[in-house]
Amino acid sequence: MRQTLEFLLYDWLKVQDLGRRERFSDHSRETFDAVFDTCEKIARDKFAPFNRLTDTEEPRFDGERVHLPRATHEALAAYVGSGMLAAAQDHAYGGMQLPCVVEMAANCFFSKASVAMGGYAMLTNGNANLLMAHGTPRQRDVFAMNEFSGRWFGTMCLSEPQAGSSLSDVATRAEPDGTDFEADPLGPRYRLTGNKMWISGGEHEITENIVHLVLAKIPGPDGKPLPGTTGISLFIVPKHLVDTDARLTGERNDVALAGLNHKLGYRGTTNCLLNFGEGRFTPGGRRGAVGYLVGKPGEGLRCMFHMMNEARIGVGLGAVMLGYAGYEASLAYARQRPQGRPVTSGGKDASRPQQLIVEHADVKRMLLAQKSYVEGGLALELFCARLVDEQHTGAPDDAAAAKLLLEVLIPIAKSWPSEWCLEANSLAIQVLGGYGYTRDFPVEQYWRDNRLNMIHEGTHGIQALDLLGRKVVMDGGRALLALAGRIGETAQRAGQVAGLAEAANELGAALAAVGGATKKAWSTGDPEEALANATPYLQAFGHLVLAWVWLDVALALDGRDDDFAQGKRAAQRYFFAYELPRIHAWLGVVARREPLTREMRDAWF
Amino acid sequence: MRQTLEFLLYDWLKVQDLGRRERFSDHSRETFDAVFDTCEKIARDKFAPFNRLTDTEEPRFDGERVHLPRATHEALAAYVGSGMLAAAQDHAYGGMQLPCVVEMAANCFFSKASVAMGGYAMLTNGNANLLMAHGTPRQRDVFAMNEFSGRWFGTMCLSEPQAGSSLSDVATRAEPDGTDFEADPLGPRYRLTGNKMWISGGEHEITENIVHLVLAKIPGPDGKPLPGTTGISLFIVPKHLVDTDARLTGERNDVALAGLNHKLGYRGTTNCLLNFGEGRFTPGGRRGAVGYLVGKPGEGLRCMFHMMNEARIGVGLGAVMLGYAGYEASLAYARQRPQGRPVTSGGKDASRPQQLIVEHADVKRMLLAQKSYVEGGLALELFCARLVDEQHTGAPDDAAAAKLLLEVLIPIAKSWPSEWCLEANSLAIQVLGGYGYTRDFPVEQYWRDNRLNMIHEGTHGIQALDLLGRKVVMDGGRALLALAGRIGETAQRAGQVAGLAEAANELGAALAAVGGATKKAWSTGDPEEALANATPYLQAFGHLVLAWVWLDVALALDGRDDDFAQGKRAAQRYFFAYELPRIHAWLGVVARREPLTREMRDAWF
């Protein structure tokens, strides 16, 4: 992977050029490579060898404490030691001022080695970043700083048992804690009551404290919470209460683990049902979880979703890395497993020695599919991460253009690898055959782990609604036009390169097909009609984007003719020959606003 | 499921008419229904409640014995008590003379309740049927009869650690056991030495004995086994030796469990590495597993594959039933889970109560997809099983026609549900969201269990080579022509029915596309060129067959207008709108003999 990662970063995205910008002026390819060296080594030594262990010894709750394998503690200690938690932060805050794209690329090594152990760090980083954007200076100093240093870890508490995708139904209440609640130096102080579900990293003893970021509703003057998402606010709820110098006060907050979820995969990350304010603990002598308001009342979702782009790129990248791990494992297997013989016009000659299975056309098909999914997915995620850097450090026009492009790309960055790198994991199992179906090989675990990614951080269906219902129509379709411009540019360049001209035409045709279907979906202006086929639209859009990414990557090979370049070209050819033609079946139902799913009645199932 | 099963059997396939045939003259819809009642009840009481238990308490080997949950013993005792093991056998052998299609339909209840527990019975049935076809009268009496009665269970021992798909590389040796080896009343006696891998039901203590059917090579005069499959013979190797009256002699045969495979799913069925002739036991005072030749030397594969059609229908049906179980579980969940609100032109009204998710278009899409996969798959398997009956009990011309049609349908019957009912299981997880990802709900287990089906009993790739490399070209393409005739007939009938005419045209066009691609694939006559894209061909062919099955099923609704009929029509419409158009992407690479996978080199990955 390292060679592909470097090619994408330096030859394709030219991230070394970011060193010319003031914020990154200490950086160059050399400093980036040094970060990769460190991360690759820690991932290899402390994460990868224990990935299976985190699955077999899943978190256990004895009613009092949650037990995790010692390896998880040690791996995360090494991660903290690397300084990666604060990698993108200012020097002033102890950070490295790494570009987002380099930070994300470096984290790939950990995700590939053990996505579940890496989960704690990703969540903590997202949590602290959010506080840097929306917290008061003291909230940053007390909470975010101690997360960047790895002293405490963090969580995001959004879902509830009865409110998963539908956050407007959040029922956790936050009530002012005393008449002087606004005077608390850590922020306006509330007491929270409610249940939060699916909380990754919600309980553990890896760190001395856990900083929960919790969505809850402040009741209106009539004592009732506002309906919808407008009434939602955001709170810092630490597991252990702390003072303004970030010392533990010795008092336990009223946050209790109600139970651990026992999952299909991703078992190394604890996933919890947390009860806030059930009275298990009584800080200040009474029940209710103490929470400090972040930002203004009613702005909880806006704050929480501030970091959404990065979080969704992170999920996509995790899916890609699981796919990558399976690709590498199945390729290694195919290179050493003899089985079968070639069928020639003369039949098979059973007296000849068996072939390695990597020589079979169908195995090569399965490996090429994986390669096109995981390397294409990696390219897409790095491209998006580079846009995040552009948005934050580019010239105003470039920043605005990057922001616009991200609008339509983020649903794909989240959903596409969740679907296709999962398929890659299934193909990895298939390459190993019966062995792949056993727990003696790692590929079955990757497949189980990856199945989560279509569910969390906005389900596949939610991404589809976001794309077709909002992103491609916003501002008269400006974001879609911007993407079309970029795709057209790539097609034009490729049209002038021998060997890529046909693909350029196919890309242009695919773009036209997606554009046409978008118009037809919305031609009646009725969201129910347009959105009934949002998921097939998302799938077609995703394949269009990946075809574009692959063609653009192929252009960066710039005439190279070595094995590496031939492999990239083959993956690009695979994607255009086997994958891109799929879009027409998906777009068919979108374009004619196929009414079947709306007409279907419950009683007919 | 029961209603759909009965509709397919009685309204579509008219299996009640089989009662007019001499072999089935004791039977009628009433006797069939009575069998279904019995099986449905045992499956509900003894299988379904313990399906999760077989997963969590997977088989454990203490070095001496294999431990299974008591529930497995009890479920299989109830199965044996039902008489289903001998359901299709002659009355003279204690059987019920049930048609194959009814026997398979009845077994659906067990597979849906617990595919892993049902596995022992399916294997035993296949084993005993094979002995009925190829064994001597005494081999039938001693071994097959005691399997049909459930006193002993059976296995099929084909694969070896170094020989999975490639049976020509079987290395287990069988050498004549003494100079009088041909005089043994149980059959020519050999001593076997070798290792057999992936043996389902290979060790357990459910029954007092296990009858292994083992492929091995008899060395030629030079002491070397023949290369290829021609040297392979078939042997009965009982775990405990028996006499001609089927009494255990008290001597243990030299068959030793080397280890249990720890699988991703399907955990309730033991899966074993067995060592034959390692000397752990010494029957007659010396090492070597005692085995009795079945049929003639060198005819092992022919004998083993005699029952292949039924075995592959059985695997397909198992995949369908896992899909069905997931469909029912996710439908039940969608009908009671509130979440979200409809998006109308006026936006969303958060003050309204939430909808049940079964009302969301995207959830209906996921449920319709499952319905079309699992009910369509069920129809296909029952159709094939009905052809098996035709082959065995039809008039000579009909029997020959049925045999011909089965040639091209069997690879689809095995592969299609393995792929698409697995997808159904993934959609079931998606409908349940986070809950579907936990082990508190059954859908994740169905998904894990089902992943096996693309691997065993001939992998997906093997089915593809069988279809494109052999079945569609044999005898000048007669089998393909026969299928085309049937499809054309259905299309013609549907063309005259209001509401189905468009689908009839689409089916005709799909048939023409598959036919055209078949010709083009073979236009150079080079198997390497034609077969490089055998798997996409298999996928397209499968979708064509399922579209045909769905249209034919829709015709059998015959103007009915109730909820049941509307549901079937919706599933048929779903398949034509969302699924059938996929074939063009698959056929594209087939038709142009896309050379990419052949040109790809190992070094480029």
Image (tube, coloured by chain):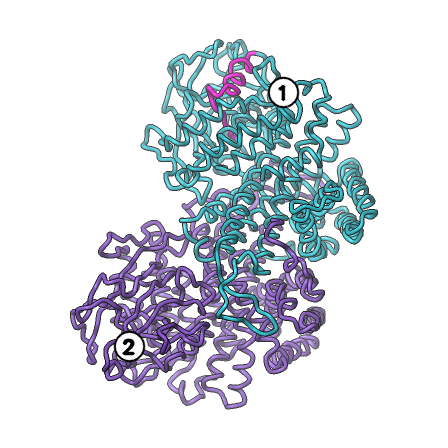
Chain colours: A purple, B cyan
Q: Residues within 10 Å of mark 1 (few under 14, many from 20)?
A: many
Question: How many badges with numbers are in the image?
Answer: 2
Q: Where in the figure is residue A305, as x and y percent of width and height? A: 44, 75
Classify mark 1: helix, strand or loop. Answer: loop
Could you tell whether A96 is left or right of A524 in the image? Answer: left
Residue A176's label in the rendered image is 2
Q: Tell me residue A510's x, y (percent).
A: 69, 69
Q: Does dot 2 land on a helix, a strand or a loop?
A: strand
The residue closer to the viewer here, B202 or B437, is B437
Say which residue label 1 marks: B97
Q: Is residue B145 magenta?
A: yes
Residue B295, compared with residue B459, is above or below; it is: above
Marker disc for residue B503:
none
Q: Chain of mark 1?
A: B
Query: Foreground mark, 2 or 1?
Result: 2
Magenta-span inclusion, residue A214? no
Residue at 43 percent of width and 63 percent of height = A163
**Residue type beneath disc 2:** Pro
The segment highlighted magenta reads B138-157
Marks 2, 1 in one chain: no
